[in-house]
Image (tube, helix red, strand yellow):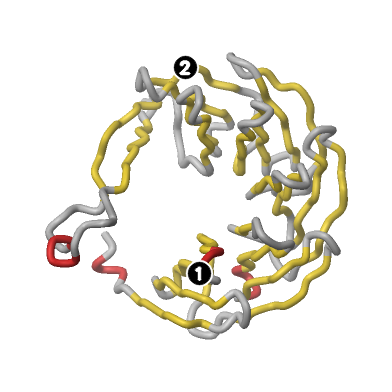
Amino acid sequence: MRRCCFLCLLISASLTLASTHAQDKAALRLVQTIPMPNVEGRIDHMAVDLAHKRLYVAALVNNTLEVLDLRAGKVSQTVTGLKEPQGMVFVPETGILYVATGGDGKCYAFSGDPLTRTSEVDAGADADNIRYDAAAKKLYVGYGSGALSIIDAPTLKPAGSIQLEGHPESFQLEKSGPRVYVNVPTARQIAVIDRIKQIVLARWPLETAQSNFPMVLIEASHRILVATRKPAKLLALDTASGKVVADAEKPMSSMR
């Protein structure tokens, strides 16, 4: 029997509540549940087209790309023939969706409604997370045993690569500068890259935790937030020095 996957969408409640009321208010609330009846196994990354109210879901184990109509609350299209779709990014200015596939190491470009594959390029084995530099019109794809592949988005042609000490997981691009911050969990570090010079500037070791996968860059506050799995922690690092300025651990038993 096929199992039905569901995608639950949540929105943030107001963050401007007075502190006396904040503890009594739920931070998130469920607004929509969308079934994906033909999807089996875990999903990976997602991207959204806000203008047309579409959500794109990488169904990694199912080897499909699912297009969800957020207005209708249902799957509107299933793109087959992909090998382990993982990372994806949607570019509103061009209407193009880029998808990285780990099974064949490709980066595909899709456009239109329904989605149609328009071009592809080799991104590297186990192509995973993908980010878009809007100013330079370049794609960055994490791949292999340790590297970022750089791709010119308009032409989908290779534009370089940057070597790392392990497979990159989540990474974030500065908007006001050339730096890229990359989680490298097998090396227990965060790599800092200059994407203009295509070199590694620094490697910040994580001494109190490992398995650093998710990352958020809060550029205005000069902070990186990194979630680790072993143990379950949230670390805040200063982007100027790489020093851990906050370390919050939460027992796994309370995270169910």
Which quarter of the image is occupied by the N terminus?
top left
**Which amino acid, by three-letter code, is at mark 2?**
Ser
Q: Is residue 26 left or right of residue 169?
A: left
Q: Quadrant of residue 238?
A: bottom right
Are the residues at dot 2 and dot 1 in contact (C-beta closer than 8 Å)? no
Viewer-closest of 119 and 70: 70
Neighbor class of circle 1 (other Cα within 10 Å; few <14, some 14-19, many 20+) is few
Return the mark for residue 221.
1
Sooner in the amino-acid sequence: mark 2 or mark 1:
2
Can you say whether 176 is above or below 204 in the image? Answer: above
Q: Quadrant of residue 171?
A: bottom right
Can you say whether 91 is above or below 37 in the image? Answer: below
Which one is in front in this view, the residue at disc 2 or the one at disc 1? 1
Please tell me which residue is depicted at 51% across the width and 60% down the height of the picture.
Answer: 216
Q: Is residue 7 left or right of residue 171?
A: left
Q: Which residue is mark 2?
A: 76
**Which amino acid, by three-letter code, is at mark 1?**
Ser
Neighbor class of circle 2 (other Cα within 10 Å; few <14, some 14-19, many 20+) is some
- Residue 215, visible in the rendered structure: no
